[in-house]
Image: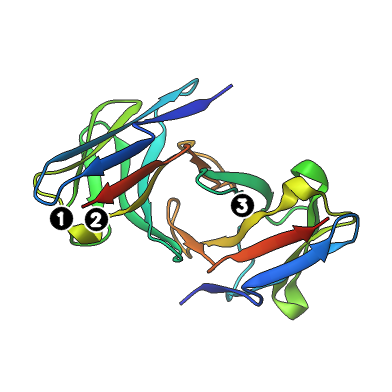
Amino acid sequence: SQTIHQWPATLVQPVGSPLSLECTVEGTSNPNLYWYRQAAGRGLQLLFYSVGIGQISSEVPQNLSASRPQDRQFILSSKKLLLSDSGFYLCAWSPRGTSGSYEQYFGPGTRLTVT
Amino acid sequence: AQSVTQLDSHVSVSEGTPVLLRCNYSSSYSPSLFWYVQHPNKGLQLLLKYTSAATLVKGINGFEAEFKKSETSFHLTKPSAHMSDAAEYFCVVRALGSSYKLIFGSGTRLLVRP
C-alpha cells in the first residue's frame, strides 16, 4: 500500500531564516505531487504541483519554491521566511494517468510557526 | 467557474444521532466530487468519492453521500454519530478540464456531544 511521509512534524523558525520541508511517497511510481498551505481558520491553498522529476508548476507567487529531485520526493523551500508563511503545510500525491479518478492523498502535515 | 459551497460552518449533534453535512456544487457537467475529513493537526483523509458511477456513494467509517444532479448537491450523511467523528469535513470538486486541481469548500466543523 502507499504511504506518504512529511517531516518535520512541527517547526518554529525566526523571520528571515531558511526553510526546507520534505515529503516522500512510498508504494507507487510516477505520482503527481502537491504542496498545499492551510492557514489558521482558512481553507487549503495549492502552492505547487509536479508531474515529474524537475517539473514544477507554481499556483501563486510567493516567498516559497519547490523542487522534485527524485520521483517520490518533493521539497518545499524558502530562502527567507516571512511571518505570513506560518501555517500548516500539507503534501499530497495522486496517481498518474488515472481514468476518471482524481483523488489526492494527503500526508500528516508540518506545522510551521514563524516568529 | 466551478465552486463548492458548504452550507454550514458548524454542525453539532449528539452521539448516536444522525449526521448531515451539506454541500452544493456549481458545475455545468457531471463533476468528480469528494469528501475529506481532517482531525486536529492531522492531514486530510479521503472519506469517499463520486465519479459518475452510482449516485449513492459509500465511504469509510459508515459515511455515505448521495449525488443529486437536479439539486446540485452532494450531502454527507452517517446514521449514528460517534465521538471520534468530531473533525473538520471538506467537500471538494475537481476543477473543470484539470487532472490535478481540486477546489475545496470552506469546511464544516462537526461537534459530537456525549
Q: CA distance from mark 2 to mark 3?
A: 24 Å
Q: Chain of mark 3?
A: B
Mark 3 neighbour density, 10 Å: few (under 14) some (14–19) many (20 or more) = many
Q: Position of residue A87 (x, y in %)?
A: 34, 54
Front residue of A37/A54: it is: A37
User: Residue at the spot x=37%, y=44% of the render?
Assistant: A111
A21 up-or-down from B112: above or below: above
Q: Which mark is residue A63?
A: 1
Q: Seen in the image, is A69 located left or right of residue B31?
A: left
Dot 2: element:
helix
Q: Which mark is residue A76?
A: none
Front residue of B55/B97: it is: B55
Front residue of A103/B44: it is: B44
Q: Quadrant of the N terminus of chain B?
A: bottom left
User: Residue at the spot x=37%, y=39% of the render?
Assistant: A33
Q: Chain of mark 1?
A: A
Q: Which mark is residue B36?
A: 3
Earlier sequence position, callout 1 versus callout 2: 1
User: Residue at the spot x=15%, y=55% of the render?
Assistant: A63
Single out the mark in the foreground, 1 or 2. Answer: 2
Q: Chain of mark 2?
A: A
User: Residue at the spot x=52%, y=73% of the render?
Assistant: B3
Q: Position of residue B95 (x, y in %)?
A: 48, 63
Callout 1 and callout 3 share a chain? no
